[in-house]
Amino acid sequence: MLAFALAVCAADARGEAALATTHAAAHIDLQVVVPAVVVARGGHAPRALVIGDQDLERGYIDIPEDTAAFVSSNSAAGFALSVAFDRSVVSEVQVRLPGASPAAAVRGGWVHVDAPRMSDAPLRLGYRLVLAAGARTGAHRWPVALSFQPGP
């Protein structure tokens, strides 16, 4: 009986030793990178640009800040706004952003918008459209296209 008990204890010790060798410890450094994303959807924007005689004489048309795009961004650094336009109708586009000085107006190209972490927030935009030398009176397709990218 004693021999049987010793054999059982020895087998039990060998089993524990085998289990102890299968345990391992490791340290893993994990870094999660969430890419900056900006999504814009159109709210309301003019569908056409109507140029009158007075506009041609003045050389530009001011559009009040009632155009909106709805923007979502997960970037703490804000986002970049790009302006493209039809050069046969306008020679320069100045986009006015709420709270920005006129010096921060975009004249074509990119501008940084300091608006961190937005969720479907309305972005009100105004414009000064400087008319091209060959612009004519009448109704024209809206000549401005905006695009948004994350980051400064």
Image (cartoon, rainbow, N blue to C red):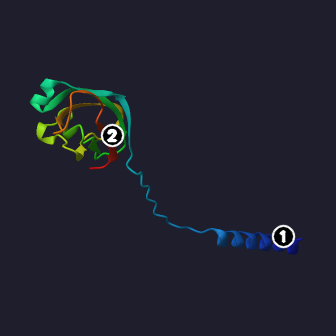
Q: Position of residue 41 (x, y in %)?
A: 39, 34
What whole-number distance in Å separates the C-alpha atoms at marks 1 and 2? 70 Å
Residue 148, picture quadrant? top left
Which is nearer the eye, 82 or 149?
A: 82
Figure check: 149 above or below 22: above
Q: Position of residue 78 (x, y in %)?
A: 28, 44
User: Quick one: SS at disc 2?
Assistant: loop
Residue 116 showing in the rendered view: yes
Residue 46 showing in the rendered view: no
Q: Left or right of 26: which side holds 56?
A: left
| Residue farthest along the left direction in this orientation | 58
Mark toward the viewer: 1 or 2:
2
Residue at image point 30% right, 32% down: 142
Other residues around mark 1 within 10 Å, as few (<14) / some (14–19) / many (≥20)? few
Which of the numbered marks, if any, corresponds to residue 48?
none
Q: Position of residue 26 (x, y in %)?
A: 53, 67
Reading the image, the residue beneath label 2 is 117
Residue at image point 82% right, 70% down: 8
Reading the image, the residue beneath label 1 is 5
Which comes sooner in the sequence, label 1 or label 2?
1
Residue 139, picture quadrant? top left
Which is nearer the eye, 150 or 95?
A: 95
